[in-house]
Amino acid sequence: QVRLVESGGGLVQPGGSLRLSCVSSGSMFSVNALAWYRQAPGKEREEVAAITASGLPNYADSVKGRFAISRDNAKRTMYLQMNSLKREDTAVYYCLETDSNGSYWGQGTQVTVSS
């Protein structure tokens, strides 16, 4: 069983930045696909960004040019650098790791963008 722990959420003003981290307990972290999702109140959970085992990123249109996903396999950690934050980025952010046995979710970290 893979355990994921997110951190780095908080309250930030519009235009500000945050960096989220997701630490994995999985031994196959370096070969697994990873992703960040978010869920705002009353809305469906949506994929924000994903990164392949080789490091190729992909972004939702709503965050392109503002967010950057990365991974450090030696630390079994994935990051989401969020810049130019908007009120509509307010949500609980979750990390996801997928291997041959299934997918694993973290518990989520709250990001609130407000003045």
Image (tube, helix red, strand yellow):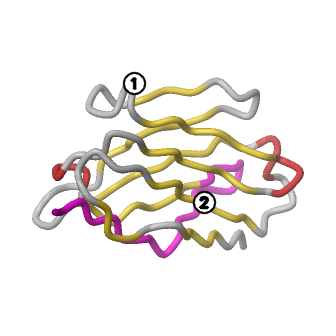
Q: Position of residue 93 (x, y in %)?
A: 40, 61
Q: Is most of the magenta stretch helix, strand or loop?
A: strand
What residue did someone put label 2 on?
21
Q: At numbered mark 2, what does the secondary structure look like: helix, strand or loop?
A: strand
The amino acid pointed to by label 1 is: Gly
**What x and y, as percent, mark residue 86?**
22, 46
Q: Viewed as shown, does residue 24 lie left or right of 51?
A: right
Q: Residue at x 79, y 52 (%)?
A: 29
Image: magenta residue range: 97-115
- Tell which circle, 2 or 1, labels the residue nearer the N-terminal end: 2
C-alpha distance separating marks 2 and 1: 19 Å
Residue at image location 78% in from the left, 46% down from the top? 72
Taking 57 as reference, is 89 left or right?
left
- Characterize the local packing of mark 2: few (<14), some (14-19) or many (20 or more) Cα atoms within 10 angstroms: many
Task: State the SS at label 1.
Answer: loop
Q: Which residue is mark 1?
A: 65
Residue 7 lies, in percent from the top left, at: 55, 70
x, y percent for residue 10: 39, 71
Determine which of the numbered discs, if any, sits on residue 99 in the image: none
Image quarter hosting the C terminus: bottom left
Picture quadrant of residue 4: bottom right
Which quarter of the rendering shows the N terminus?
A: bottom right
Outermost residue, left side: 42
Q: What type is the residue that disc 2 sits on?
A: Ser
Q: Residue at 52% x, 35% y: name it.
A: 68
**The magenta stretch spans residue 112:** yes
Residue 19 to residue 4: above or below: above
Where 80 sits versus 12, above or below? above
